[in-house]
């Protein structure tokens, strides 16, 4: 049975769930999204985001290469001898360890840079009629929202970890 527009609850869409009905429009207009806070992010954090992007691309490329190599090894199991299979798997383990160390080092670098930038939130420039604490909280909001976005990238990189593949 279809409901007319006046019979629906305000703020609730077709599924009846106000959290599911927002969809992409809700995500794109989120104040926590990286593109929403990007103009206020300090330059040092923007530089770190560039580094993290490079690490993310390398991690995804390495994971793809490892999956392709594992697949080719399973197809060539009958052709190759045991020592060459062990040598190939050892090379994949080394690659996975290097990737894991790179993501870990990037995580520690983020912690260092984030706590280096965090005190800058107390510096407010210019004249404003707003209370000082609201300006500081606005700066802290940008830093914490940026950190939440970065942690979501680290979560994806952690899920790509090749420990379960090899």
Image (cartoon, helix red, strand yellow):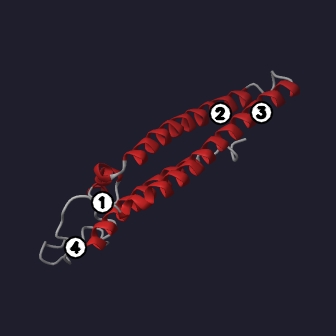
Q: Position of residue 47 (x, y in %)?
A: 43, 41
Q: Residue at point 29% right, 65% down?
A: 21
Q: Position of residue 110 (x, y in %)?
A: 52, 50
Q: Residues within 10 Å of mark 2 (few under 14, many from 20)?
A: many
92 in relation to 22, above or below = above
Picture disc at residue 89: 3
Q: Which residue is mark 2?
A: 66
Sequence-wise, the earlier of marks 4 and 2 is: 4
Q: Residues within 10 Å of mark 1 (few under 14, many from 20)?
A: few
Dot 2 falls on a residue whose secondary structure is helix
Sequence-wise, the earlier of marks 4 and 1 is: 4
Q: Nearer the viewer, mark 4 or mark 1?
A: 1
Q: Which residue is mark 4?
A: 11
Instruction: Answer left or right for 56 relative to 99.
Output: left
Q: Residues within 10 Å of mark 4 (few under 14, many from 20)?
A: few
**For the residues marked 1 and 2, what is the alpha-carbon distance in whole angstroms?**
36 Å
Closer to us: 56 or 43 = 43
**For the residues marked 3 and 2, what is the alpha-carbon distance in whole angstroms?**
10 Å
Instruction: Answer left or right for 115 relative to 95.
Output: left
Q: Which residue is mark 1?
A: 30
Q: Quadrant of residue 106?
A: top right
Q: Position of residue 122 (x, y in %)?
A: 36, 64
90 in relation to 159, above or below = above
Q: Position of residue 6 (x, y in %)?
A: 12, 76
Sequence-wise, the earlier of marks 4 and 3 is: 4
Closer to us: 85 or 116 = 116
Q: Nearer the viewer, mark 1 or mark 2?
A: 1
């Amino acid at each position: 049975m279809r409901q007319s527009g006046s019979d629906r609850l305000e703020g609730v869409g077709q599924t009846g769930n106000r959290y599911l009905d927002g969809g992409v429009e809700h995500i794109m207009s989120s104040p926590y999204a990286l593109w929403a806070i990007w103009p206020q992010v300090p330059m040092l954090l923007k530089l770190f985001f560039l580094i993290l992007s490079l690490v993310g691309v390398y991690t995804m490329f390495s994971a793809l290469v490892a999956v392709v190599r594992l697949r080719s090894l399973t197809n060539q199991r009958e052709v190759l001898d045991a020592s060459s299979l062990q040598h190939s798997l050892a090379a994949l383990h080394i690659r996975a360890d290097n990737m894991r160390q790179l993501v870990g080092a990037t995580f520690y670098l983020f912690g260092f840079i984030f706590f280096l930038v965090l005190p800058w939130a107390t510096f407010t420039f210019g004249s404003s009629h707003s209370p000082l604490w609201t300006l500081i909280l606005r700066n802290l909001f940008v830093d914490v929202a940026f950190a939440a976005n970065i942690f979501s990238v680290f979560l994806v990189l952690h899920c790509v970890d090749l420990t379960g593949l090899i």
